[in-house]
Image: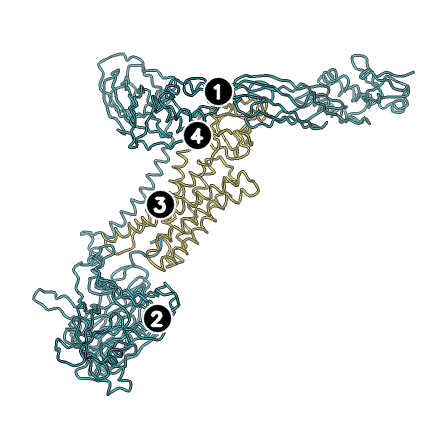
Amino acid sequence: MVLTCKRCGNTNPMEAAFCFFDGQLLQNANSPALAKKPELSIPFVFPNGRKCISFDELVLTLLDEWSESKKLLKQGTFAQYFQKIGRPDLSVRSEKCRIFPDTDLGVDELINCLPSSINLNPELQVETERINLGIIKPGEDRDLNILLKNNGLGMIKGSAVIECPDFWITLGDGQGTNQKSLHFVGEYKLQIKIQGKRLRASDKPLQAKITIETNGGSRDVVIAAEIPVIPFTRGCLAGAISPRKLASLAKINPKEAALLFENNSVQEWYKSNGWIYPVPGPAASGVAAVQQFFEALGLVEAPQVFLEPRSHECSGRPGEKINLSFTIYSNEKRHVYAHATNTPSTPWVVCKQTDSDKNKSTISVEVIVPYLPPCQVEGRINIFSNGGKVFRPRIYLSVLESDKILPPPLPVSETTTPKITPTIPTPSGATSEFNDSELPKFRGTPALFLGCLLMLGIFGAVVRDVLSFSKNPVDESISKVLKTEKPDMEPLVFLTFNEADTQVSFGAGLTAKPTAGKTKVSNVGVQEAHMSFCIHTRPAEKSGKPKRLMRDSDGFTNNAIVRINGSDWFFGQGPLKFRDKAPQEFIEKANKNYNGRWLTMKQIIPESEAPFLGKGYTSVWQMTNPSVEITQSLRIIPGPQTNKLDTVLVRYRIENRGNKNLNIGFRTLLDTFIGSNDGVPFLIPGESELCSTSKVMDGQGIPDFLQALENNNLNDPGTVANLGLQNPGLEKPSRLTLGCWPDYRLGNILHDGEKCKEAFTLWDVPVANINTLNPADSAVTMYWDPTMIPPFKTREVGYSYGLGTFAGSRGQGQLALTAGGSFQPNGEFTLTAYVSGHSSKDSLELVVPEGFKLIEGTLNTPLRDSQSKYSISWKLKAPSTEGDFTFKIQSSKKFKEELEIRIRKPILGGVFG
Amino acid sequence: MSLRLFVIYCALIGGICSYLGWAVGLSITSEGVLRAALKGLFAGALIGTGLSQLDSIWNGRSLFFAICHTLIAAILAGAGGFLGGIIGELLFKIHNSLIIAGWLVTGLLIGMAISAFELFMSLGNPMAKSAAVSKAIKCMVGGAIGGMLGGGIFYSVSLVWASKFGPGIFWTPPAIGFSVLGICIGMFIGLAQVLIKEAWVRIENGRWQGKELILAKPVSVIGRREGCEIALFGDRNLAPEHACIRKRENGFFLADLDSPDGTYLNKKRIKEETPLATDDIIQTGATRLKFLEKTRTRA
């Protein structure tokens, strides 16, 4: 005896409980396997009479009777049954399975939760793994089914995913999807749709892969198809099988090809091959259509096109028609094409035909004046032209008063929604085509608000500046503060240069002097212009005479030396030219320290008002071997306290033009002179006595400024010269000496007197008392010691020299005040009082305005006995705020003097102001 | 808000915040490098705050995310501004003519710092990283251009003002300079987001009509829950998480998230993930969205 499986028809031995081939439960109640496991106390009987006495049997029956099982689950039969047999746990789980949205999954879940020994092993089988669709046409939709089978036990669960670049096949119906979840027990038809509208003709076959991944295994199904390209069949473009081929044929015969573009044959050909036509909008007329196609393919560059006019203004009564035109043109000899559409907000404009003529295209537009009360409306149209260029010209329409009572309807456009700006009222008593409720809301109001806020903020800053800095006659305090802010652009000083050849004679020790044209002097040489300079004061009155602040009117007695790697060279002085009879040895000796020439001389820098600067002069001195370039810049600038153009900023920019590091130092000698006084004593801030002898200072001991008075009378000091040593962007001298000008006569007096060679003195200037010679002759020597300058790096040194600040009118010749240093907020400066005619019994009191900090000195200073005038200095720190401040001094003898100090921030107080 | 309006808002918010940064900086009493650094810090922090807030509001971020984003952006941008201020001031001290270079460096650093947050967030996500890198580059370009323009305007206006009023510390030049700096940074950050977009949706009706939202993330959820990428507050027919748009290698797909009223694509209810094409109309609840995609060249 054998048992036959009802499912697969195979035979099994009598003692078998399940089919050996498919695991199907065999109707063998005597099977020892089942007999041993009577797990269900009450057998479960399916509606078709099939009885289950164990969980294994129940599982197998559930799988066999799938649709019946779904019904029973939905009815809640299993939950009731398990409750009845005393398995409330299974009852609860059955109930959960019952409420599954998908009943198939519910039954599957129920099977999985039953205590069965059946091994569920689904196995996926795909009917076919490759489908060749053959030749199909673009636009042709097709439906396919792929049969999936489950050759194992249990439910197959998984997903199918399509991989194809153009998405030309989808899963399911309609638009379809590229991914689908699957679950089935027996068989399943996977529905495939060929999306005809996504098919593109190509010389390569199309291929798509469907990957089916399930718990019963994974399978790939490949779907292939061919979509051959339909060749173009008409006119001169016949035979083209690709856009590029078509373009090459069109290039050969553009006029004939243009007709095919114009009548949309090419567009139709594109469509028949499923390709997207690259030209947006309607085809241009004539050869322009070919160019339009070429531009769209990117084969040629579009010409630059322009619109004329950029807007139109017109007016009319409601219902009236107004014709306008816009011209698109190019300056290149290329075809221009264009077409226009109106925008949704401009339903009252109708775009008409376009006339193209070589590099010009004219678009006609008809304005149909809408039925509105008199108002102004604004609209735009879109004009599309070469290279995708879009112009959006505006049309301003003035609607005039209408005599009609009932307005006819507005022109209807399918693509447009009537829209006007909300501010325009609808006509009263008449039905308007415009519906306020449909008007688009203006979403930019907050943006407008933010923009206004920002403008307001900037406006606030402008107002603050104007109020604070412009002259305000009502507010005298502001006026007072600012009255001298803007300097008088009339300079109080001027410059003269040595810009002509000078005849010089050489005496003993090669000291040279200008001969003043006396040609009979022996050892006469000619020195070329060396751009030394002299500063002069400009007289206040026309009848007055200018005063020199240096000894010679061309600055001949000043000199400057460049020290390079230990060798000294005259700055600005070329080799001397001697008469033929001069001995060669003498010439060589005399010209030992000359090396260079002027590249440019006295180039004028014009005056500027931003910032306020006077005239300037630049000269460039070039040295060879070693290669160094020195630029001498002289600029008339406003004095820090006077705020008048009364100071000259002298700047030397030294650049190493060679390819090796050089040790470069600079020394300049100033032969100081005021009016007719060649031996003026100096005021050194911090020193109690005026310097009328000599002084050597270096490092920190060098003050910010030096001052010299023309007259010894404090009540009438005459011209006050100020030498500024601390200047922005310029190195402060590393050493400074005050003393006698290096006259050759000092050679017999000083131990190193042989170095005194007047205007031809080299680096070291011997220091002697100012009054060593008679008459006294003072000079200032500034040294910038050599430092290493790499190739093409620079060093800037210099000083300022001009008129100084001095207050002596109130002091009755007994007291005077002056100041120098940094007059910026938090800057440090020195206040110096000149004292005369007081004794040791007296004292001097300084009144410091609020905010200033006294760094050195005392507010009440005891005076001393002295025959001549002397000085008392205080070092102060300015407050952090700007303003004008008055410093007062008063002696115990009731003499008083006061000086106004301006504290101002610079124009650019930092990178951010 | 349309994308164009978004760029305008970014520019204006950047400008206003930068202006406010400068205004706060007026209270600084210190001098020199510290003063410049603090001014840069205030400007950077406020620009970062304003732009991150706008980004959070525009994208409907959750409050927590918005706070975190704002804090980090403010700190980073503030640090960028601080460093930029130091470098700028040092350049200025070398020579006055380097003032524009100083501004440029400051703008560059603020722009870079603002985008650093996005870069950090994109780590480990290649799709987001390329967008973040693109945004960072545009932020830096915006900062550099803003710095250059701002510095140039600052310098020019300073000279014009000085010629008109004489020397002094003015408010107008830095006020305009900082505003321009902020406007440029904001504008380029806004442009960066708009230009790198592949697809976006435009709300066609209802309260948010006209608003355009960029689909920048792999999954953009449509719903009324705070934190949804496409948050449509106020639509009572919309589920908290109603539907989603997924970005895959071969395009964008719409899927319904088991919403009670369903999701419709071109008036057909969708049951499974469905590919989207440009100009498709998505209906979720009472709101219609138009899906728009940049034209992709087919091979």
Q: Which residue is mark 1?
A: A231
The quarter of the displayed image where residue A549 is located: bottom left
Q: How is the image coloured?
A: by chain
Q: Name the residue type under label 1.
A: Pro
Q: Position of residue A723 (x, y in %)?
A: 24, 70
The chain letter under disc 2 is A
Horizontal side of residue A180 vs B15, given as left or right = right
Horizontal side of residue A571 vs A57, given as left or right = left
Q: Which residue is mark 2?
A: A664
The chain letter under disc 3 is B
What is the total number of numbered labels drawn onto the structure image?
4
Q: Position of residue A531 (x, y in %)?
A: 21, 68
Whether callout 4 and callout 2 share a subunit is answered no
Q: Name the residue type under label 3.
A: Ser
Task: Name the secondary structure under disc 4.
Answer: loop
Viewer-side residue, A856 vs A819: A819
> Given this view, does label 4 or label 1 mark the residue nearer the observer?
1
Q: Name the residue type under label 2.
A: Ile
